[in-house]
Amino acid sequence: MGFGIFGFCLVLTLFFKHLACHQPNTDGFFVSEFLKKTVSSSSYSTFSKSYYLSGSSYCSWQGVLCDAQKEHIVEFKASGLGLSGPIPDNTFGKLNKLQSLDLSSNKITGLPSDFWSLTSLKSFNLSSNQISGSLSNNIGNFGSLEALDLSNNNLSEEIPEATGSLVSLRILNLSRHRFEQTIPSGILKCLH
């Protein structure tokens, strides 16, 4: 009987420990939701076990760097993993401490409306994806952005004037697009 109670307590402990890293409104939950929606359903289980979700804490996932308190994700790298489709709402837009995001060389097709609230973002690499349409004027919300690489997508129309408000910007790569007209003068003031 003692083993039964011990076994039950052990199972409960492991169950709640596993749930803790996927609790709603945690950075781990938002990243796991992103992966569930951008990794093909046929390969998600294998992908998550072998690449990201193998650790008990999201701070131990491959490609993830957390702050010193192990509460918030500050860096996320998922380059060349075959991720596809738009970045869903209520995923990366909820990572309010995120400073570096690298989703390059995937098949990402769009950004969510809540993405533009990432005011802590310093480095953003979305190169070699399948983003099309125009670049949002909301790009000006990234006041801390130092490096932006959106090269090799399918953006068109004009480069928004709001890019001129990115006063911390030091690296900008918008090559291999179909932008119209000239580069806004505000960008040249940002790039020293």
Image (tube, helix red, strand yellow):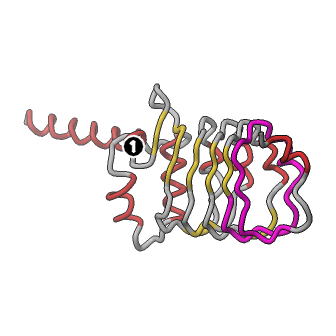
Identify the image quadrant of the N terminus: top left
Residue topped by disc 1: 19
Secondary element at image label 1:
helix
On screen, residue 36 versus residue 50, left or right, reads: right
Which residue is located at x 12 percent, y 39 percent?
4
The image shows residue 123 at horizontal and vertical percentages of 63, 44
Judge from the rendering whether residue 78 lies leftward or rightward of residue 92; answer left or right. Answer: left
Q: Magenta span has 164?
A: yes
Looking at the image, which residue is at 62% across and 67% down? 129
Q: Is residue 2 above or below residue 148?
A: above
Which residue sits at x=72%, y=71%? 154
- Residue 33 lies in magenta, yes or no? no
What are the residue bounds of the magenta stretch? 150-179
Q: Residues within 10 Å of mark 1 (few under 14, many from 20)?
A: some
Please tell me in which quadrant of the rendered image residue 21 appears.
top left
Q: Is residue 97 left or right of residue 180?
A: left
Snapshot quadrant of residue 16: top left
Q: Amino acid at mark 1?
A: Leu
Name the foreground residue: 77 vs 176: 176
> Which is nearer the eye, 109 or 165?
165
Q: Residue furthest top?
A: 69
The mark total stands at: 1
**Residue closest to the eye, 41 or 174:** 174
Image position, residue 85 (x, y; %) = 60, 68
Residue 76 placement (x, y as % from top left): 51, 47
Quadrant of the drawing holding the C terminus: top right
Residue 26 coordinates in the image, percent (x, y) = 52, 39
Please tell me in which quadrant of the rendered image residue 87 appears.
bottom right
Q: Is residue 38 above or below residue 60?
A: below
